[in-house]
Amino acid sequence: MNSSATVAAELGLRLVVPEHGRVPLTASLYYRGDDPYAIRMAFHVGMDYPVEWIFARDLLAAGLSGPAGEGDVRLWPSVEPDRSVLNISLSSPYGQAQFEAPLAALTRFLLRTFEVVPEGREEEFIDTQDELNDLLR
């Protein structure tokens, strides 16, 4: 266990476009031991900078086995004979998008994050005093 460790993965996923099928794109996943509750997902959409979303690691864990999330980020698995995906629905004041990501790849990524910070032990990796000092500045 190392609070400075980072887990990263490139992920091929598909943007679900109603009436047009699915558009392939790439996202990067990041997890840092010094920010143990958060998963960062950066979408590479042809702009200078990727579009980044941050959501709870617990949300990803819950979404791999059933519907999870309310509001801006919702996840649910879809297991079919020829493919298993995690549906990711993201919404903001600027719009809404739904993606399909490979369930197995996300499961492997999540398991790697548990090697950095075990599930349920996140609070041990946060320097509460340092966080409080940052808030009070």
Image: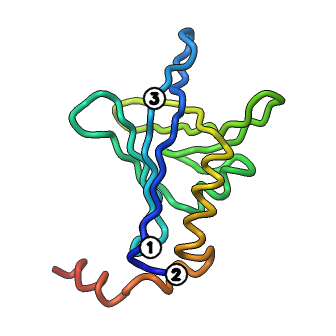
Question: What residue is pinned by disc 2?
Answer: 1
The answer to which of 68 and 118 lies nearer the viewer is: 118
Q: Name the N-terminal-most of marks 2 and 1.
A: 2
Residue 25: mark in rendering: 3
Left or right: 105 as drawn, with respect to 7: right
Give the residue displayed 36% in from the left and 35% down from the top: 44
Q: In the drawing, does residue 65 fall left or right of residue 109?
A: right
Mark found first going from the N terminus, 3 or 1: 3
Nearer-N-terminus badge (2/3): 2
Amino acid type assigned to the residue bearing label 2 in the image: Met
The amino acid pointed to by label 1 is Gly
Q: Is residue 113 above or below residue 11?
A: below
Dot 3 lies on which element? strand
Up-down relation of residue 128 to residue 103 (above or below)? below
Q: Classify mark 2: helix, strand or loop.
A: loop
- Identity of the residue drawn at 31% across and 81% down: 131
| Label 2 CA crowd tier, 10 Å (few <14, some 14–19, many 20+) | few
Residue closest to the eye, 14 or 95: 14
In whole angstroms, how far apart are the C-alphas of marks 3 and 1?
27 Å
Q: Secondary structure at mark 1?
A: loop
> Can you say whether 60 is above or below 37 in the image?
above
Quarter assignment of residue 33: bottom left
**Picture disc at residue 129:** none
Quadrant of the image occupied by residue 6 = bottom left
| Percent of width and height locating residue 51 | 33, 40
Q: Which residue is mark 1?
A: 33
Do the numbered discs 2 and 1 sit on residues whose CB atoms are within 8 Å? Answer: yes
75 left or right of 48 in image: right
